[in-house]
Amino acid sequence: MRRLTDALRTAGLTVWLDEEAVRPGQDWAAAISQAIDHSRIVLVALSEGSAKSDWVRSEAALALSKADKRVIPVLLSANADIPLLLRSRQHLDLSDKETYDLNLRRLVEALRVDESSTKEADDDARYRLAELERDALALEMKHLSQEHLAANLRVLSSTLAVALVTAGLAVLATVLFTADGRTSGVMAGILIGAAAALSIPVTFPPLTRAFGARVRG
């Protein structure tokens, strides 16, 4: 198994091996279960002894129960019997010295293809997520622009209305002042002041809010 692990690492693949990764005192079953959860491919190394191990069968059964895991039985000994639960899976024979190198290359190629496919799927998922985020941002900006336009139209409409009222009051004040001397002049001043007061909240809304805040404070 060590020879196979070294060969896969030399080929640039990441390998988790239980006998070197599980720390002293660590729960063996929990560590292997976690390792299987974080792996894409599980190689079940079958020697004459491991093929009869209940532990190996339990680990293989756990890997097979995960729908997103690819399980590959690897025959390391010609005398090893493939457990029944793994016989439906195509195994790779590394027990024959004459075909060892060829089958090892086949294994490495298969693992690299799987790694490449996973990377492409991850890249595609990230690209689609970025597209969704761009679309959401564009929609939000459009909504904000529409709200801004509507607010501007409301202010413009109010400004025009106040301007018309102000102009009407100013004309009326001028007529009263001309027609009736001092008394009418006082009334004209009141009308002009009222017109100015009407125009302040629309023309200078920040000033109005600040003044109101000071009065309340």
Image (spheres, rainbow, N blue to C red):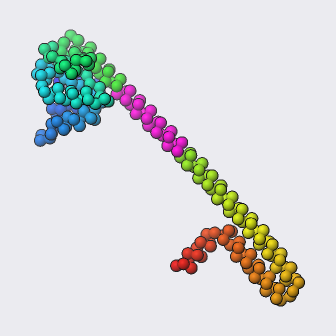
Q: Is residue 117 magenta?
A: yes
State the image coordinates of residue 101 (x, y, percent, origin top left).
24, 15
Residue in the image at 56% along x and 45% along y: 138
When asked about the image quadrant of residue 1, the answer is top left
- 66, above or below 80, in the image: below
- 124, above or below 97, in the image: below
Magenta-drawn segment? 115-136
State the image coordinates of residue 123 (x, y, percent, origin top left).
42, 33
Residue in the image at 47% along x and 36% along y: 128
Report if residue 77 is visible in the image: no
Q: Residue furthest bottom?
A: 182
Report if residue 162 is visible in the image: yes
State the image coordinates of residue 124 (x, y, percent, origin top left).
44, 32
Locate residue 8 relative to residue 155 in the image: left or right. left
Locate residue 168 relative to residue 81 in the image: left or right. right
When asked about the image quadrant of residue 9, the answer is top left
Locate residue 212 relative to residue 65 in the image: left or right. right
Residue in the image at 88% along x and 83% along y: 178
